[in-house]
Amino acid sequence: HVKHGGKNSYEMFAHSMNIVSKRRLQIEAHLRHAIDNKELYLVYQPQISLHSGKIIGVEALLRWDSPLLGAVSPVEFIPVAEETGLITPIGEWVLFEACQQAQVWRDEALPPVRMAVNLSVRQFARQNLESVVQSTLLKTGLPVRYLELEITENMLMDDVEGSVDTLHRLKDLGVCLAIDDFGTGYSSLSYLKRFPIDRLKIDRSFITHVTTNTEDASVTQAIIAVAHSLGLSVTAEGVESADQLAFLNENKCEEVQGYYFSKPVSANDIKRLLIVNQGLPDS
Ligand code: C2E
Ligand code: MG
Ligand code: MG
Ligand code: MG
């Protein structure tokens, strides 16, 4: 509600716009040097197979600790990076860093896991995406089957023909492809079958109340059914409780990811988790 008296609402609006754009400009200015200053790093969140109970993959998630702005969430700085084009070097850095880390774990003879990397809108739209992916795999030595790329629904629907083409070029390399935040966008099922993808990731917003809200439960079941009928596997995001896990297990979801198992953690913590993982019964 608008508070009357003192400043008029235009002044208040202008004032708050000013704060928003100042923050945006600060982020842009500092983000420009974040790679060189080594302010960016990755954390990794385990993805657990419900079939084996083991960690089967990790998702790389970007973090930025700015000496001037403090910790800035990717939810805030990724859009700025998108608008300014800074996402190109940042995205390439993320891809390299994630593949290199996955290869380090392989060199350490840890149980093999997939490395999932989020792609941004601009990265996905670039003509040379598959050559960037290919050269990153060559440079790091990571076999292609360990790399999964996450693309959001809306990125695919912006230009369906172009997306089908890009996905095929990536698929030809042998990478795994996942649709992230599935259910929140506007993809049509008739297009879904045209995309050469491997997995749907059910958005956290459906999982949060999946055991208490019948609509969320129905949507989740419907997504799993559609995925399976198209030969895709399903990962549920944002699993925070044993009840949610039981629901997903009952409904034949393949994989889960969420705070119930682990928050995103450092590479070292993943290493510890993978060592324990080895002790679990074989699948
Ligand atoms: P996303 O790819 O859907 O990643 C999942 C987000 O949910 C992550 O937030 C993760 O920390 C959070 N999460 C996971 N499990 C739970 C849970 O059980 N409960 C709750 N409340 N949250 C959970 P994060 O790390 O803040 O990342 C947010 C978004 O920023 C990502 O959503 C992704 O869209 C984007 N992002 C992060 N890293 C990158 C990156 O390297 N490149 C690009 N292009 N985008 C990135
Ligand atoms: Mg993701
Ligand atoms: Mg997601
Ligand atoms: Mg998300």
Image (spheres, rainbow, N blue to C red):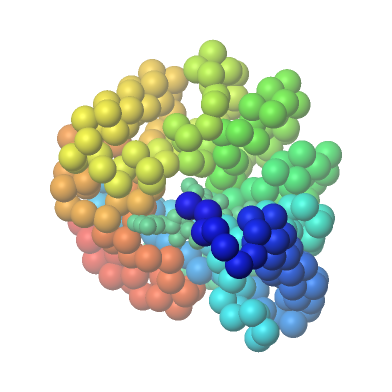
Residue at 44% x, 20% y is 230
Instruction: Give how far across and how far down residue 145 sits, in percent.
Output: 56, 46
Instruction: Give how far across and how far down residue 239 sits, in percent.
Output: 30, 51
Residue 88 lies in quadrant? bottom right
Residue at 70% x, 61% y is 11
131 left or right, relative to 20: right
Residue 86 lies in quadrant? bottom right
Whether residue 93 is visible here, answered yes or no, is: no
Q: How many marks?
A: 0
Residue at 48% x, 41% y is 181
Residue at 57% x, 39% y is 152
129 left or right, relative to 261: right
Residue 224 lies in quadrant? top left
Q: State the residue in front, 188 or 227.
A: 188
- Considering every residue shown, the one lying at the far top of the view is 190
Instruction: Give how far across and how far down residue 125 sits, in percent.
Output: 77, 39
Instruction: Give how far across and how far down residue 81 sits, in percent.
Output: 73, 59
Q: Is residue 45 above or below residue 234?
A: below
Q: State the residue in front, 229 or 83.
A: 83
Whether residue 84 is visible here, answered yes or no, is: yes
Q: Is residue 183 above or below residue 269?
A: above
